[in-house]
Image: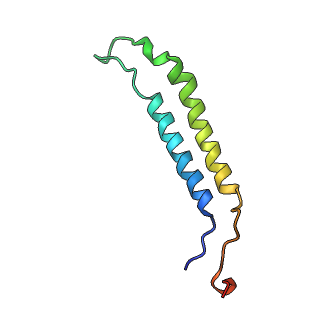
């Protein structure tokens, strides 16, 4: 068995953080003009300029926290296994 630097909890937190980042970018998308020339004021909606960046930054912060966090249970090595 290989020794991993992260525990199961770290991997779960990283997965949640990546999901939050993806949700943030999806919230930022859209709002373009139909013909490419006219102005669409929907690009300045609260969802796109306030909510989506906050969600995305929170996701990036959670990635950092999940990398720095030490696992609760000690990682077992082959020579430290209980018989």
Viewer-proximal residue among 56 and 11: 11
x then y, percent, for residue 72? 71, 62
Query: Residue at horizontal 42%, vertical 29%?
Result: 29
| Left or right of residue 63, residue 42 in this image | left
Total of numbered circles in the picture?
0
Viewer-proximal residue among 3 and 33: 3
x then y, percent, for residue 47? 51, 22
| Left or right of residue 22, residue 34 in this image | left
Q: How is the image coloured?
A: rainbow
x then y, percent, for residue 80? 69, 84
Above or below: residue 15 compared with residue 55 = below
x then y, percent, for residue 13? 59, 51
Instruction: Please state, as top left, top right, bottom left or bottom right, where the C terminus lies in the image.
Output: bottom right
Within the image, what quadrant is residue 1 found in?
bottom right
Above or below: residue 70 compared with residue 43 = below
Farthest-out residue, front: 83
Viewer-proximal residue among 82 and 41: 82
């Amino acid at each position: 068995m290989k020794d991993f630097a992260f525990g199961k909890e770290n991997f779960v937190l990283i997965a949640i953080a990546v999901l939050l980042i993806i949700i943030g970018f999806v919230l930022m998308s859209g709002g373009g003009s139909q013909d490419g020339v006219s102005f669409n004021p929907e690009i300045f909606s609260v969802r796109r300029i306030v909510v989506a960046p906050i969600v995305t930054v929170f996701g990036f912060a959670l990635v950092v926290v999940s990398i720095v966090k030490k696992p609760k249970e000690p990682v077992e090595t082959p020579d430290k296994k209980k018989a």
